[in-house]
Image (spheres, rainbow, N blue to C red):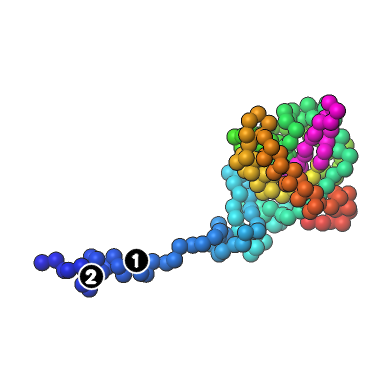
Amino acid sequence: MSAPPGRAGSPAATLLRLHRNRPAPVAGERCEMCAVPVEGEHQHVVDLENRGLMCCCRACGLLFTEDGARLRYRTVPDRYLSFDGVPLDARAWDELQIPVGLAFLFRNSVQDRVVAFYPGPAGATESELPLDAWALLVSTVPELAVVRPDVEALLVRRTERDGRAGVASCHLVPIDACYELVGRLRALWRGFDGGQEAHAAMDAFFERVESRSRPARAATGDGAS
């Protein structure tokens, strides 16, 4: 004869005991390396092999900050710089083969090449940059050489006024900030050019970048990180 429900040793009692002893569900984000809870504003590391971003705590982030080390992971720094007078006229922009007015450029150290990503309704679209065009740009503006491979990007936005295109802003930003912008625009994108909400989100993002940036010329002389 089977034991009545709830009797010690019965299947029902076993299930009830397992349910009571079940650990509470994890609330919030956790470090993807050591599993400790992380705050809303937290660090990321780049997995260089698959280009993925991983959430991490400060302790784990400190393990992957050495630029010269041969590591699979690299911690994304929290550095914002502004560049003035970058000569990205229509001809230079065409030479970089970027088809839109907003892009972020970074060096992929594993593939040893510079790539550009530009946002759109499907997310980020990748475009490999001609190395000679990028080298020419860096030789013209040596401060651009401070952009760290894999973890920092050159974020460029061009606007058109009176029928002429020009560079509205050029900043060094953490790579995770770029993907944050891409995700935000993808969620809001409407129609051919993104729509009003996407453009408002873009303006707000660049206002935040501008407020956190300092001149790149000063940073290249003081060894800032």
Could you say which disc has been placed on residue 48 in the image?
none
Q: Is residue 136 visible?
A: no
Are the residues at dot 2 and dot 1 in contact (C-beta closer than 8 Å)?
A: no
Q: Amino acid at mark 1?
A: His
Q: Quadrant of residue 2?
A: bottom left
Left or right of 195? Residue 158 is right
Other-residue count near label 2 (Cα within 10 Å), few / some / many at <14 / 14–19 / ≥20: few
Q: Is residue 165 visible?
A: yes
Identify the residue at image location x=33%, y=67%: 18
Identify the residue at image location x=77%, y=38%: 157
Of mark 2 and mark 1, the one earlier in the sequence is 2
* 139 drawn magenta: no
Where in the figure is residue 90, as x and y percent of width and height? 82, 27
Please provide the residue range marked out in magenta: 150-169
Tell me how far mark 2 sits from mark 1, CA to CA: 13 Å
| In the foreground, 193 or 166 | 193
Q: Residue furthest left?
A: 1
Q: Which residue matches tag 2?
A: 6
Q: Is residue 77 above or below residue 164?
A: below
Q: Which residue matches tag 1?
A: 19
